[in-house]
Image (tube, helix red, strand yellow):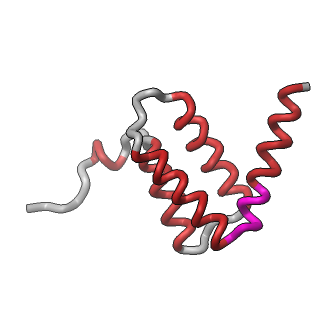
Amino acid sequence: MSTSPTRRELFRTPNTKDKLTLFQILLDAKLLNKDMSLALLKVIHKELGTDMRIDPTLYKDYATSIAALDYYTSDILQHVVKSWKAMSSANNE
């Protein structure tokens, strides 16, 4: 029995769970920087807020990832929050 992924699995469009998994893997490996975190979290946050078909457990996973980011690299989380606030205030002007 082959355990290798099929071609279809390798080239499918990633879903929100995949992106959260990638974020957590990068965080665990200490490979996240401020810009990468901002980009991934912006996409994940948007998908969680707009797609009504999202599995409710993904919200818990998202919260867990944010808590881990705050615990291990609070400076990165502060950068993300500051950037979101700046984008939000620019959109309101």
Q: Would residue 35 be found to the left or right of residue 5 on screen?
A: right
Check residue 75 for magenta coloring: yes
Q: Is residue 28 above or below residue 22?
A: below
Q: Would residue 82 be found to the left or right of residue 72 on screen?
A: right
Which range is magenta?
73-79
Q: Position of residue 55 (x, y in %)?
A: 38, 39
Q: Position of residue 9 (x, y in %)?
A: 30, 46
At a point 65% along the width and 43% down the height, the residue shown is 42
At a point 18% along the width and 62% down the height, the residue shown is 3
Q: Position of residue 29 (x, y in %)?
A: 54, 74
* Magenta stretch, overall SS: helix
Q: Would residue 92 be found to the left or right of residue 33 on screen?
A: right
Number of marks in picture:
0
| Pick the front one: 12 or 70 | 70
Q: Position of residue 65 (x, y in %)?
A: 54, 59
At a point 40% along the width and 46% down the height, the residue shown is 57
Check residue 74 for magenta coloring: yes
| Pick the front one: 76 or 66 | 66
The residue furthest left is 1
Q: Is residue 54 above or below residue 84?
A: above
The quadrant of the picture occupied by the N terminus is bottom left
At a point 83% along the width and 28% down the height, the residue shown is 91
| Pick the front one: 71 or 90 | 71
Q: Would residue 20 be found to the left or right of residue 57 on screen?
A: right
The quadrant of the picture occupied by the C terminus is top right
